[in-house]
Amino acid sequence: MNIDEMMAQAKDLQARVAAAQDDLAKITVKGLAANGACIVEMTGKYDIVKVIITDDAMKNTATDLSKIVAQAFCDAKDKADALIDKAMSAATAGVNLPF
């Protein structure tokens, strides 16, 4: 592969990754904890869109409530990670990296 082909491939890859990142910014996932007592909604770029805490969850101690919120965040992040992996795999599919 010559340098011109490599540069063209790199530009194509850059465009596909940028498009995937734009798409991820528009997709949301929901993380749940304590049987839905807390829901964290975030984008595929980890931007928090919404946090919902039920009245029942508010009856917990501050320590327990913070654990529930953290669990919902971690669930949302895991789901976002899976979306990111899928989107980036699709964006880089067929690219022969020179290493």
Image: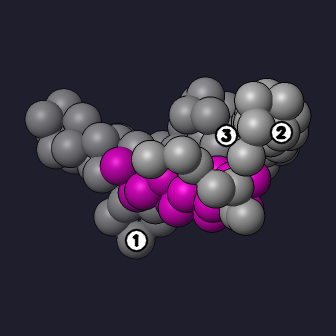
Q: Name the residue beneath numbered marker 2.
A: 5
Q: Name the residue beneath numbered marker 1.
A: 35
| Disc marking residue 16 | none
The residue sitting at the bottom extreme is 35
Residue 41, located in which quarter of the rendered image? Answer: top right
Q: Nearer the viewer, residue 95 or 19?
A: 95
Earlier-in-chain disc, 3 versus 1? 1
| Amino acid under disc 2 | Glu
Q: Up-down: is 91 above or below 16?
A: below
Q: Name the residue beneath numbered marker 3.
A: 43
| Residue 90 coordinates in the image, percent (x, y) | 72, 62
Q: Nearer the viewer, mark 3 or mark 1?
A: 3
| Residue 49 coordinates in the image, percent (x, y) | 67, 32
The dominant secondary structure in magenta is helix
Residue at 19 percent of width and 32 percent of height = 62
Q: Up-down: is 82 above or below 27?
A: below
Q: Secondary structure at mark 3?
A: strand
